[in-house]
Image (tube, helix red, strand yellow):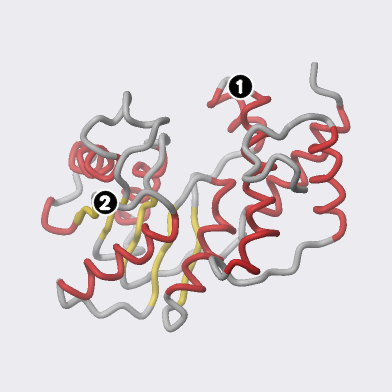
Amino acid sequence: MISEQSWADAQVLWDYHQMHHDLRPCSVAIGLGSHDLGVADTVVDLYKRGMAPLIVFTGATSPTTRGRMPRGEAVHYRERALELGVPSSVALVETKARNTGENIRFSRALLEEAGVGVASVLLVSKPYEERRAYATASKLWPEVQFVSASTPMTFEDYVDSIGDAHLVFDMLVGALQRLLLYPAQGFIISQLVPEKVTTAYERLCDAGFTSRLALDDAK
């Protein structure tokens, strides 16, 4: 049984992980590969709303997605987009990236090779990955403006969609830990983490939501 305090702390992390950007038209939309086909659906919705004239789906496979997406995350995302009516000519794929940094670097290289001028990027990820994706992209591609987006949904609805609250709590904690650790390693830009967020994170670690931590002893 997860305590009320842990639910409240997880809500704090959920809110912080999202950038709450106002959406606006960008040069291209980049959909970051994962187990969640909802990312592809959101990219398609944004494309149909005129938010980007071009799409890049990026991602290879991982132990989590290999069974569900044997042809690779980006390929399955693109197939989903075509099923939803996106023209094949505007949906590019990058199939080698295995982490967020590679998602950004390889997508940038793909667009440069295609001769696409990029001033702004609509960066689409899972809801709890918005901030880390933004921090990574801002570090690796600083001359571009990034607008973060994800499937609009409440924390409760996301937990219901996954069907495993403990796993979602673990993922929120792991994503926050990386925001704390990765700036010093040069992977992402540094961002202000309010005290209430770090306090909630530490309580969740103490409550045992640690399976997604990069280091067993890190908080």
- Position of 144 relative to 217 (above/below): below
Disc 1 vs disc 2: which is toward the camera? 2
- Position of 81 relative to 66 (above/below): below
Q: Mark 2 points at which residue?
A: 96
The residue under label 2 is which amino acid type?
Answer: Lys
Q: Position of residue 21 (x, y in %)?
A: 57, 64
Give me the C-alpha separation between circle 1 and circle 2: 29 Å
- Position of 213 relative to 197 (above/below): above
Residue at x 22%, y 42% (from the top left corner)? 75
The residue under label 1 is which amino acid type?
Answer: Asp
Which quadrant would residue 72 be assigned to in this image?
top left
Q: Mark 1 points at which residue?
A: 164
Q: Residues within 10 Å of mark 1 (few under 14, many from 20)?
A: few
Residue 47 horizontal side relative to residue 182, left or right = left
Q: Where is residue 8 in the image (x, y as percent from the top left)?
A: 82, 37
Q: Where is residue 157 in the image (x, y as percent from the top left)?
A: 61, 30
Q: How crowded is mark 2: few (under 14 residues within 10 Å), some or many (20 or more)?
A: some
Q: Nearer the viewer, residue 153 or 194?
A: 194
Which quadrant would residue 83 be assigned to in this image?
top left
Q: Which of 14 and 100 is in front in this view?
A: 100
- Position of 161 relative to 28 (above/below): above
Q: Tag 2, which secondary structure?
A: loop
Q: Which numbered disc flags the more N-terminal residue, 1 or 2?
A: 2
